[in-house]
Amino acid sequence: MEPQGAWREAGPVGGPVAPRVRAVEFVRRMRGASQPCLLRCEDGASYVVKFQNNPQHARVLANEMLASRLAQLVLLPVAAPAFVEVSRQLIRNNLHLAFEVGDRREPVVPGLHFGSRFPGIPSETLVVDFLPDRLLRRVQDLHDVFLGTFVFDKWTCNCDGRQVIFHRPANGDGSAYSVALIDHGFCFNDGDWTFPDSPIRGIYPRRLVYEKVRGLESFEPLLSRIEDLTPGELEACTRGIPPEWCEPDPAPLGRLVETLYDRRRKLRQAIIDTKNCSLSPFPNWE
Ligand SMILES: Nc1ncnc2c1ncn2[C@@H]1O[C@H](COP(=O)(O)OP(=O)(O)OP(=O)(O)O)[C@@H](O)[C@H]1O
Ligand SMILES: [Mg+2]
């Protein structure tokens, strides 16, 4: 369901779109090297927000927005992205809207930042980063999501370990968790916008998610969905990304998308290379 009252950034017809929303309340800091914060926004939803002047890289925001939209385009369950506007006044009234850099405190800059939508009302929703195998097995669409995500991470050369959140209603004892993809800040190799491919990259540490792999066909329909994308669909996923998110130079964003288009055709071989690597992540391949 889309948040109410949000105006929508122009996106491709029928393609992924990201709303632009104003932050109205600081909720809490989140863990993480980019020092994100949970902010409640005017649409009533809350977002985990990564800021332009975060301690990692400004391009982390461009990477998050582009990768989230690409994931939406191929129908992976990614946490919904947004452009979150943070005002000078909100920063002035919240000492927490600042980074700790050594013993210095550097305030967040006002402007547009990247938001990843929290799945529900924070006080009523249980969100965890990891689950024991017993609960992991019961996650909705577990195998489809993780096999599709594996292809996606190969395509985007996600240089970080795959991160997801598992969530369910806080009062829903015994109900199965849903999964959502998060943290695409290190896709396209962080601020480098290069693709240092490796067969061992992108393997989720909990191997049970791959136990249904029998061959290349197990990675469908994601594999074909990515292969069938058009240049226009990919290009549309960069719309509205502010140049400040691409510092020091926004120009290579166009080239990055062209490279992604070319890489679609290398995915089958990349999967086979992973199958053959020393970690043998797909023991049931026939
Ligand atoms: N959309 C979301 N909804 C709920 N929680 C989220 C969401 N996005 C991120 N989180 C939580 O915030 C934490 C930090 O997010 P993220 O991993 O994207 O930041 P990071 O700076 O890359 O952190 P790290 O360096 O530890 O990977 C996650 O581990 C997760 O628990
Ligand atoms: Mg992370």
Image: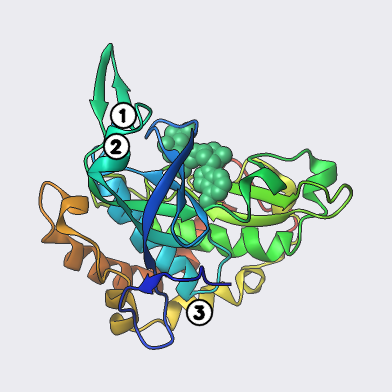
Instruction: Tell me residue 173's x, y (percent).
Output: 87, 47
The amino acid type of the residue labelled 2 equals: Ile
Q: Quadrant of the N terminus?
A: bottom right
The amino acid type of the residue labelled 1 equals: Ala
Q: Nearer the viewer, residue 268 or 177?
A: 177
Number of other residues with Cα within 10 Å of mark 2, as a class: few under 14, some 14 to 19, many 20 or more:
some
Q: Is residue 240 above or below residue 84?
A: below
Which residue is pictured at 42% across the width and 75% down the height? 16
Which residue is pictured at 18% across the width and 66% down the height? 255
Q: Quadrant of the C terminus?
A: bottom right
Residue under numbered circle 1: 98
Q: Is residue 228 left or right of residue 163?
A: left
The amino acid type of the residue labelled 3 equals: Arg
Q: Nearer the viewer, residue 68 or 42?
A: 42
Instruction: Tell me residue 125's x, y (percent).
Output: 69, 48
Q: Is residue 121 left or right of residue 35?
A: right
Indicate which disc, 2 or 3, sits on the residue closer to the N terminus: 2
* Residue 277 visible to an observer of this rendering: no
Asked whether the beta carbons under mark 1 and mark 2 sit within 8 Å of each other, the answer is yes
Residue under numbered circle 2: 91
Instruction: Tell me residue 65's x, y (percent).
Output: 35, 59
Q: Nearer the viewer, residue 213 or 6?
A: 6
Dot 3 lies on which element?
Answer: helix
Residue under numbered circle 3: 225
Scheme of colours in the image: rainbow
Number of other residues with Cα within 10 Å of mark 1, as a class: few under 14, some 14 to 19, many 20 or more:
many
